[in-house]
């Protein structure tokens, strides 16, 4: 009886091993597509209304920001799309205009983004700018060496908002998708 149990257990184990296995496909790695996304902040600028009132003339702020995202050949050769996101908030009593110029290494303007905003109270202005197959040419981003931000006061230099700590804030970030194979 004990011998019959051992034979049945052996037979059952053998059937389980051969019935649950199939040929393995080790070439599946060729079908694997790795497409990571990278997100980063580009710049953050805040200008208080008191500072804007102290500056004579229309331009109250101009600054160049280095944009070295495509300095690495690994990144440049594999990027397939990207989105630059901007958020502009104006709590001042002034209508404003923000101009972003994308410059190449020779400081030639290769693209421009313009934001106009009424005085407070206004909602936050959000804009996504796509680059790649569904948007602007990726070459704009690939050849950008710096971004020049110019802020223009389209109002006066004496009014003040009744909102405490009134200011103009511009935030930006970027998200790029790469293909690794």
Image: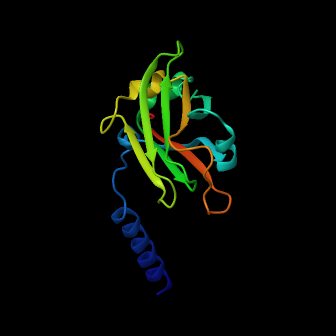
Residue 121 horizontal side relative to residue 61, left or right: left
Quick check: can you spot residue 35?
A: no
- Identify the residue at the far left of this view: 134
What residue sits 48% from the left and 26% below the top?
102
What residue sits 36% from the left and 68% below the top?
15
User: Residue 61 falls in which quadrant of the image?
Assistant: top right
Horizontal and vertical percent for residue 33? 39, 41
Horizontal and vertical percent for residue 137? 35, 28
User: Residue 16 falls in which quadrant of the image?
Assistant: bottom left
Horizontal and vertical percent for residue 132? 35, 34
Residue 27 horizontal side relative to residue 86, left or right: left
What residue sits 69% from the left and 48% below the top?
50
Comparing 25 with 144, the one in front is 144
User: Residue 40 falls in which quadrant of the image?
Assistant: top right
Comparing 109 with 161, the one in front is 161
In which quadrant of the rendered image does the C terminus lie?
Answer: top left
Horizontal and vertical percent for residue 71? 56, 23
Comparing 98 with 45, the one in front is 98
């Amino acid at each position: 009886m004990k011998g019959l149990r051992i034979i049945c257990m052996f037979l059952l184990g053998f059937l389980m091993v051969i019935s649950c296995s199939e040929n393995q496909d080790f070439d599946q790695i060729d079908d694997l597509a790795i497409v990571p996304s990278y997100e980063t902040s580009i710049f953050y600028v805040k200008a208080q209304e008191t500072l804007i009132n102290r500056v004579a003339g229309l331009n109250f702020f101009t600054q160049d920001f280095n944009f070295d995202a495509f300095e690495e050949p690994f990144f440049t050769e594999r990027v397939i799309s990207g989105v630059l996101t901007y958020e502009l908030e104006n709590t001042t009593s002034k209508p404003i205009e923000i101009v972003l110029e994308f410059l190449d290494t020779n400081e030639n303007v290769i693209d421009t983004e313009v934001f106009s905003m009424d005085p407070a109270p206004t909602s936050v202005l959000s804009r996504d700018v796509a680059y790649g197959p569904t948007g602007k040419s990726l070459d704009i981003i690939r050849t950008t060496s710096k971004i020049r931000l110019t802020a223009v006061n389209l109002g006066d230099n004496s009014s003040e908002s009744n909102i405490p700590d009134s200011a103009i804030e511009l935030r930006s970030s970027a998200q790029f998708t790469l293909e690794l194979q």
